[in-house]
Image: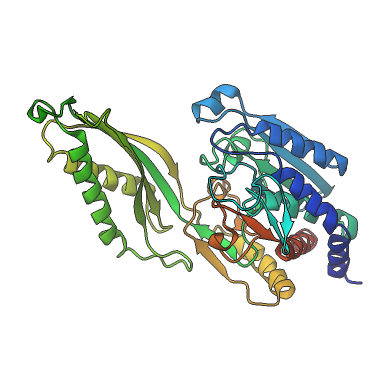
Amino acid sequence: MSAYDQIDAWVDAHFDEELRFLQALVRVPTDTPPGDNAPHAERTAALLAEMGLVAERHPVPAAEVQAQGMQSITNLVVRQRYGAGGPTIALNAHGDVVPPGEGWQHDPYGGEIDGGHLYGRASAVSKSDFATYTFALRALAAAAPPTRGAVELHFTYDEEFGGELGPGWLLKHGLTKPDALIAAGFSYQVVTAHNGCLQLEVTLHGLASHAAYPETGVDALQAANRLLTALYAHNTELRTRRSAVAGITHPYLNVGRIEGGSNTNVVPGKVTLKLDRRMIPEEDAAAVEAEVRALIDGTVATCPGIRVEVRRLLLAQSLKPLPGHERLAATVQRHAQELFGEPIPTCGTPLYTDVRLYGAAGVPAVIYGAGPRTVLESNAKRADEHLALADLRRATKVVARSLADLLTND
């Protein structure tokens, strides 16, 4: 048997164990918000220990976590060294996830298997890749152990709020500096670039008054209406800015939340908007923020009596391919095409991820893991999120084979 055959056979022989591991992870909620994620890290570390894998626990100080609007974070690092020299390849997946919401036909924390799919919140994004990466590491060690290099598992808990207290925290504190990274993604594509994201909180201050005497007030909601019109009209311009990266089209601006007013018989004195501006890899983040702020200021200037405050919530840079990513992408792509029996594209994604933080640290990265062709197919972040078991099995083999090549042929 070839090394690849031995890896595949090991994954097949241990697949029921991999499923049980993923079910156990799904059954511990990691809804963010509220973001009380340390218990999941403890459960994960205990399960890894049962497999003989030692997980370093790296708790983020409570004050830093609470300042980000979460309750607890403990990031995990598993280090497996095979010998002196050679590269260190990190595998990163995040355990935090948005709350389940309404409309589920399956228990969001049940890990139920039905019709060849495993259902549950984070079953596809991205607790699935806790399983993919853990069992790829085990398959490599058991079936084709390298003689040099190292593999690290990074299981982190801050992707939903930007990643600064997940991978960003590990990198900032010098707890890791891998030579290459494979991060949680989907089985049918190898992602090499992604959009950036700017999120702003915009508060319009007017003057509240009795609705029977509107002339005594300054209506912040009318100003917000004018601002909303201007912001959404800006999308006409943004649609003309096309990206050259396959899978990414153009920038977009969305207002996702509006709060304001006090009662139906009161002229609103304060309205707050939260907006999300997606940036294509070709855009400069500082220029984008300056453009959005200028649009806001210019529009509010036409609203007498209105004062505006703008607060940045998030600035996530785009992920751009770094030198060295080509070998990563080609290796994963080759094995995926063989195991899935169809072309596996390399492309970008309009999502933003915490992989950008590795890129900012100079680490070449690709995004690849268990899942369907698209986020929508898996119902990720929607009711009845699910993962095809066949995809989990094949993706685990792809990652294990890729590690064998990357460490052996360096």
Question: For the C terminus, which image quadrant?
Answer: bottom right
Q: Residue at x 72, y 44 (%)?
A: 25
Outermost residue on the right side: it is 1
Residue nearest the observer in this picture, 81 or 112: 112
> Which image quarter: residue 145?
bottom right
- Looking at the image, which residue is at 46% across and 52% down? 318
233 relative position to 23: left or right: left
Q: Name the residue located 81 percent from the left edge and 41 percent from the top edge.
A: 48
Q: Is residue 228 visible?
A: yes
13 over 72 or under it: above or below:
below
Q: Residue 392 lies in what quarter of the image?
A: bottom right
Please indicate whether residue 396 sits to the left or right of residue 321 in the image. right
Location of the N terminus (image quadrant): bottom right
Residue 34 lies in quadrant = top right
Is 135 on the left-hand or right-hand side of 336? right
Say which residue appears at 27% left-offset and 42% top-offset. 293
Q: Position of residue 300 (x, y in %)?
A: 18, 39
Q: How many marks?
A: 0
Residue 142 image point, x, y percent: 89, 56
